[in-house]
Image: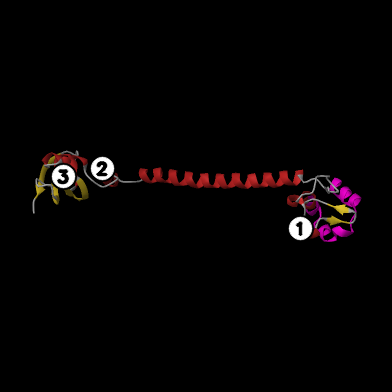
Amino acid sequence: MEKCSICLSELKFSNTPLFDSGKIKDGIICTKCLRRINNVDPSIISKLKNIQISDIQYLLQNQPSNKNKFTKEAVQGCAIIVVIIIVIGTIIGMCTSGGSNDEKNLTQTQKDSIAHINWIKNQFNAWDGSHSETEKLIKLSMNNPDSYKHVETKYRDFGKMGLIIYTTFRGTNVYGGIVTNNAISKIDSTGKVYDFKILTE
């Protein structure tokens, strides 16, 4: 078998350059050596057929070292990434600290209003918007509590007096048919239900 004139590896189909591009004046080179030559001096590739083995070996042995270049590029790349991370961290820090300064400047009425809005949010299931205490009461009044399906919940806010909650739900009736019903519950400012009824159509 023929061997590469530079590295002496056996030439096979997988490592032989196509279209005789690996031919040199006194031999043939493999694709690996062809890439090495191209990395050192790409202009030589078009003149390979006129270049001898000794010239190529001299070129490859005396190639400039790329270690320092790679290290500088790597350091520059890392420095850029570190700067980006610092900038993003600073922006996030400004945003989060800005929020706490704004809270200090709020009036008591504004703070109470925010607390009330948060209290309302906590009354309802974040997943489907249902009110858990109302659901418990609905299931207690149903013929088949396991058939309960929440459809929709709406509310009216009465400030410190509490909320009125309107719940639409489905379930099976006495005859096994699926029916849709509505329920109304009133809750006080502590979240306790003090009035409840199911509306029949």
Which residue is labeled 1 in the image? 18
Residue 45 part of the magenta segment = yes
| Dot 3: element | helix
Q: Earlier in the sequence, mark 1 or mark 2?
A: 1
- Left or right, 182 with respect to 111, comes to left
Magenta region: 36-63
Q: In terms of sequence position, does the residue under pointer 3 or pointer 2 come before the other?
A: 2
Q: At 90% from the left edge and 52% from the top edge, which residue is drawn?
A: 55
Identified at 36% across, 44% down, the residue is 103
Question: Circle 3 is placed at which residue position?
Answer: 161
Q: Secondary structure at mark 2?
A: helix
Q: Amino acid at mark 3?
A: Met
Q: Is residue 188 visible?
A: no
Q: First in sequence, mark 1 or 3: give its number.
A: 1
Residue 114: mark: none
The span from disc 1 to disc 2 (Cα, nearest Å) is 75 Å
- Which residue sits furthest front? 1
Q: Please state if 196 lies on the left or on the right of 150 as rendered.
A: left
Per the image, the residue denoted by label 2 is 119
Q: Nearer the viewer, mark 1 or mark 2?
A: 1
> In the rendering, at what x and y percent does residue 126 appear?
29, 45
